[in-house]
Image (tube, grey):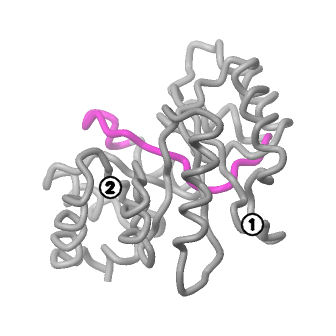
């Protein structure tokens, strides 16, 4: 695969809809060369789904002052390592994971400063994320456990129109804490997400071809 320059220009143009939205480039299955090319163009915000891949890919790029987000499911037994690699973990989705993160936050090697709670906005059994009914409890539990919750993340059902789910995410956020950021919108629906004031769009496959 290679970087599609036309796609990048399209995304950057679309981002003009918002004054604050950021592009998080998902580099899952991409090479270090691709990442270096993107860095040379001024991009510094990247996302990875897998812990091991992120560790291998970004350990040689620490001097570039990048911001790396974990956007895939996180197993409790990999929390210690994840906290050393990622600046932000977007996939907090259960009380036991909060407990494990909290236990390790005070260690000197921790890099992670921010966390997002992943919401199962479509109530899909096959997807990760806290249920809408439990979100309030998990949010306040996370704060009690000293996690710096900066936002909410979701992966809506793969339907023709994500608008209802993005609208619901916005309403949920507003009822919980209006200062929280929203991480929503991927390659197939980021334009829709921008219409609902997403703060971070997570785009991968559209950029690489």
Task: Give me the disc on residue 127.
Answer: 1
Task: Give me the disc on residue 23.
Answer: 2
Q: Earlier in the sequence, mark 2 or mark 1?
A: 2
Which secondary structure, mark 1?
Answer: loop
205 left or right of 131 in image: left
Q: In the picture, residue 99 is in which quadrant?
A: top right
* Circle 2 Cα neighbour tier, 10 Å, few/some/many (<14 / 14–19 / ≥20): many
Q: Quadrant of the N terminus?
A: bottom left
- Asked whether 14 or 29 is in front, the reply is 14
Identify the residue at horizontal 63%, vertical 14% (top origin). 107
Q: Quadrant of the C terminus?
A: bottom left
Identify the residue at horizontal 56%, vertical 22% (top origin). 110
Q: In the picture, residue 186 is in which quadrant?
A: bottom left
Residues shaded magenta: 60-76
- Measured as percent of width and height from the top left, residue 126 is found at 79, 71
Identify the residue at horizontal 28%, vertical 64% (top origin). 34
Give the answer, above or below, for where 141 lies relative to 156: above
Task: Give me the disc on residue 204.
Answer: none
Give the answer, above or below, for where 64 lies relative to 42: above
* Circle 1 Cα neighbour tier, 10 Å, few/some/many (<14 / 14–19 / ≥20): some
């Amino acid at each position: 695969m290679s970087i599609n320059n036309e796609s990048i220009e399209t995304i950057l143009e679309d981002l003009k809809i918002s004054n604050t939205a950021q592009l998080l480039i998902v580099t899952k299955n991409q090479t270090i060369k691709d990442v270096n090319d993107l860095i040379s163009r001024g991009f510094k915000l990247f996302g990875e789904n897998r812990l091991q891949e992120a560790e291998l890919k970004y350990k040689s790029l620490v001097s570039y002052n990048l911001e790396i987000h974990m956007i895939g499911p996180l197993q409790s037994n990999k929390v210690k390592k994840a906290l050393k690699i990622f600046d932000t973990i977007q996939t907090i989705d259960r009380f036991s994971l909060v407990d494990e993160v909290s236990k390790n936050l005070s260690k000197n090697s921790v890099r992670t400063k921010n966390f997002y709670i992943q919401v199962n906005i479509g109530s899909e059994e096959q997807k990760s994320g806290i249920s809408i009914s439990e979100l309030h409890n998990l949010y306040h539990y996370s704060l009690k456990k000293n996690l710096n919750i900066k936002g909410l993340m979701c992966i809506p059902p793969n339907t023709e129109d994500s608008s209802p789910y993005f609208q619901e995410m916005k309403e949920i956020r507003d009822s919980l804490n209006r200062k929280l950021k929203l991480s929503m919108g991927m390659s197939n629906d980021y334009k829709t997400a921008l219409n609902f004031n997403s703060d971070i769009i997570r785009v991968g496959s559209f950029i690489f071809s």
